[in-house]
Image (tube, coloured by chain):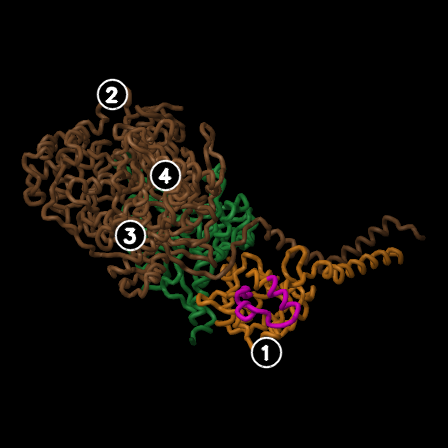
Amino acid sequence: MSDIKKPQTKPSRLGMVIDIDKCNGCGSCMVACAVENNVPPVPQAAGERKAITWLKVYRVSNGQEFPNHRTVFIPVSCQQCGTHTPCVSVCPQQAVDVDPQTGVVGQMPERCLGCRYCMAACPYHARYFNWWDPVWPAGMEKALNPAVSPRMRGVVEKCNFCHGRYHAARAKAAAEGRTELAPGEYLPACAEACPTGAIKFGDLADQGSEVSQMASGEQAFRLLESLGTESKVYYLTRQPWVRQLAATPLKNGREEKHG
Amino acid sequence: MAIISRRDLFRFAGGAAVGTMLSPLPWKLLDDVSIWTQNWSWIPKPPKGAVSFKYTNCTLCGSGCAAQVRCIEAEPVSLAGIRSDIGLGFLCPLGLVAHHLRYHPDRVTQPLVRAKGDELKPSSLDDATRVVSGKLQRLAQQTQPSDSYLAILGNRPGTAGSDALLALLARFPHAAYVGCPNDGDGVSVLGSMVEGDQNWALDIANSKMVLSFGAPLLEGWGTSGRMLAQFASSDRKTRLIHVEPNCSLTARAADVWLSIQPGSEAALALGLANVLIEAKLVDPSVTCPDLEVDSPYRKLVAEFSAERVAGLTGLKPEVITQTARAIAQEGPALVISRGYVSGPVSRAEELAIQGLNFLLGNLDRPGGALARPSPSQSQVAGPTPASQPGPGVVRALAAIPDGSVELLIVDASSGNDLPPWAAVQPKLSPDQAVVVVLAGLPTAWAQRADVVVPSPVFGEAIEELPGNVDDTANSLRLSARLVDPRPGLFNLLDFVNHTAVAAGLATSPVSYEDAAKQKVAAIHQAGIGNVVSPADGQAKAVTDYSSSDELWTALAGGARWENAAPEAIKPATRRFSLAGPDSGDVERMRKAAAQRGGLADVAPSEYPLTVVSAEGRAYDSKVSPLLAKITWESGLHAERTCMINPATAAKQGVLAGTTVTVQTPSGSLDVPVTLSEEIMPGVLLLEDPTGEDQSGLMTGTDATCRVMPGRLEVA
Amino acid sequence: MELRGKIGFLGGLVLSLFVGWWVFPLALYERVEQPLDFSHKVHTGEQAGMSCEDCHSFREDGSFAGIPKVENCTGCHSEPQGKTVAEKVLYQEYVSKNREIPWLVYAQQPENVYFSHVQHVKRAEIACERCHGAHGKTDTLRPFERNRISGYSRDIWGRSISRISRASWEGAKMDDCIDCHAERGVEDNCLLCHK
């Protein structure tokens, strides 16, 4: 009980490791994310560009013809940049900031004025704009998650590593007299929903954690590493063509990494 | 001077302005107005309350995966799969939004009745009951020579509700109770090749190698979570050889992908059997001693050499030989067929595929096909009288005489598949038939009905879930009642009971829930098996439950009963029988293999392409608006489209996104085009999220097919 | 400027100051009575002797039950316990109909605010009175003074429009939270308190 009055929790660097060789493109992670974070459905006539998918699984191909054509699936959410956060540096409202305790880049839609500068700045196109007020079918608003507040139109939103679950985990720890969260006590919805266990989440600063070991392994890489964002979402693959693709910026067509 | 001049007013206004700035009015107003603009009343506020976790099993498809439900007070707000026991299944995108289903805007909320030649109109339960009970009375009282049938579609063999319905149907001189097609339909064909009345389950979890003939293992086949855990990872313990023309998700993940010409599965199966026997990779006198050397099957196999099959499938002869070697020596491999995923099985094709299981000695061994007590026998102990079908009840669609069904009751309420309309329609009486459909959402079947009865959806009622093809244990799982349903919803048994009472055919029949409770009581009495709790994965013996009510409460809360070692059904010998009820099997197998299921009969100039139905699970964004995230909002999965190889599209003069008319000898369909290098050139892959062929496009000699000759025109 | 001009200016000044400082706070809020005149004193005093946590409890997962549901009241009040008007209303309108009492919450924050009681009560060991005042000793519920524009209680801004010399429980604006966090050197990252 003595550690409960400690003023701060131990600083951590929350990150993710996604094994591309295990991802089979089912999309469970995307749906679980939308359910957890009350992401609204978007009118179909608006098209893919105006859709809101905090986590988006991209189809990436090796460019070959049948039967040598291979697709991999790369789930991309906010990459939680580390040293250099483009969105934080351009926001005129300070509507996004980096939590020094966890390293999570937190988006505050309530401060956002909707200029969308951050959307242009984000190299991963991981930020989405609410073109409309949220509309769910009648009655379905009763099934929304109270841990995350719905956003109105005109604001930008993005992945925050499920801050609603983070709040709940911290509250539970406090109820039990702890300040530290045990590894695995808090898991974002995508990591929980992935049927193959391709998405792993944890503290990159903890040497003994699974994610920190995987992230320092040979197969690990990050998207657009040359930009120097020092993002905290790592990917694993044994396929060299996928690593090459991740390093290069984008081409036209479906096989690009952003919409 | 008393007149107030303009200058006075300006001075006053100036003073007022200064004073206002020095007062809290503008600053507080700004603050309050900004708060007001952030709190529009039409932005929903999620209801608050205590968080609790419940357990259940998903009913959105036949897999019945286990789920943990997070509830705020009584309202389910999210679902999660249970990772600690992957054998229970794991939630796919459909399961993750199962709790939205009851808020679907198109929900069927009241009975709909169609007057002759008119459209479906909202009606009352009394009206619907009157129509149906009138028919029931007529059908029950008919005498010879009339042979009008009462047919019920949607049998889930082995469930308490199914057993109770069979008992009721015994009163009718002519009745049919046809099962839900499912992934295990191929294995049923295996069952028809041996004597004895038993169920077969595939022990995939313990297989060292699997040879899959198109089974979409990573796209919703069997217990999907278990399949994903076993096959999706590149460091898996089970080797997978997958046979499929196109590079599906399963093909992509397989260790070996054999891309064959569509429709040549039977040819490949016979070719592999040929090599197994000729190269002495198996000893049939050991693996299936009843198979005589001069049997029609052996003679048929001898006709399909590796070279001949290479020509039919498009594979190289050495690939066929290598594959035969691998499945004999590296396993032996368990041979799996797709079962009903996008259409019924072709019996001829299945016989060829299952023949391999016999040759490889896969019956009755761990990692192979295991026999279990059949659904007509109690899972606990011995056959029960109620579960014996009456003398007039037929169980197969094919056994119903054409044009004889006067009353058809279809259970379209849950995630199970149904036979396609094209297969059922010939059985209906041309002028007297009444089609009753129980549905929660307006499915394609509901739109063909004369009477639609609203049924409960996920979470609204207790539902017993039968096991999957890869469940080797006998098990009992229930989907829980999580919320109070609106009144007036019926499941199949309760509706039939209700109308039977109205028709005077029954007085106080056992309800669906009571039938399930009785089954649980029988289990409790027999004291067999364990109950596994999804919350902690702990198993508790049935004998530890002091009353059957306590056992029921556990099961109704998502726990699973299982009898992991049910008495094995093992006759002295396994008679390999291709005769079945119809000895034309060998001839049909020959034709299926040699003519690629009839495709080779068609002139390429007329139908230069081949139309194939997609096998994997369809994510129809109409089930929940959030499923759109993985369909059109991201382009990850295609909805209602025809996928074509770009080279083929170029030759046909078709661009991505164009709407084309796909034509086969039996029908046509307008559909937009998606280009993909994952599709074999010359093949048109149809993704149809409704899961049913509404256009009659895929109707061949087997009532419907998965593979048809086709052509396309730009619409 | 001539005297006349000065009078005009001063008149405007005085009038606007009067409106801004006196009329405005009066008009800004509307008084709404609580649905039931609940007496904390009766429940926490000698007669029933309950403490805050008996009704405003924490659940196992650390979430705060807030204002209790009517079933909590029914625990003791399944039959009328006294002869007051409030008792009668409680029984007739709420307990017997099993209807939730539509309390007006003084401390209500906007939807996007996440305030964790367990962190402040269990971890920081802050007394209830520090933020809620001597609410537990009141004999009657004061009317809810609803801000006509924002809809929230006057308690959030504080009684005084100038916010000068406030007690610790007068005011629950974000600035007040930040001030206390800064004073104690506690983490104040945005997403910690916003959802």
On the picture, is B339 further left or further right than C22? left
The residue singled out by tag 4 in the image is B410
Mainly helix, strand or loop, the magenta region? helix
Q: Element type at marker 3?
A: loop
The residue singled out by tag 1 in the image is C47
Instruction: Inspect the image, locate mark 1, and give the three-letter code of the amino acid beneath it.
Output: Gln
Query: In terms of depth relative to the viewer, which is nearer, B676 or B695?
Result: B695
> Do marks 2 and 3 both belong to one polypeptide chain?
no
Query: In terms of depth relative to the viewer, which is nearer, A57 or B670?
Result: B670
On the picture, is A201 further left or further right than B120? left
The answer to whether residue B133 is visible is yes
Label 4, label 3: how far apart the Cα atoms are:
52 Å
Instruction: Inspect the image, locate mark 4, and give the three-letter code of the amino acid beneath it.
Output: Val
Range of magenta residues: C66-93
The chain identifier of the residue carrying mark 2 reads B
Label 4, label 2: how far apart the Cα atoms are:
38 Å
Q: Colour of chain C?
A: orange
Chain represented in brown = B
Q: Measuring from the top left, give residue C140's x and y in whole percent.
A: 65, 70
Q: Element type at marker 2?
A: loop
Q: Measuring from the top left, give residue C110's x and y in whole percent.
A: 57, 58
Label 4, label 1: how far apart the Cα atoms are:
65 Å
User: For the residue carrying disc 1, how many other residues have a C-alpha within 10 Å: few (<14), some (14-19), or many (20+)?
Assistant: few
The residue singled out by tag 3 in the image is A219
Check contact, mark 4 vs mark 1: CB within 8 A.
Answer: no
Query: In terms of depth relative to the viewer, which is nearer, A64 or B437?
Result: B437
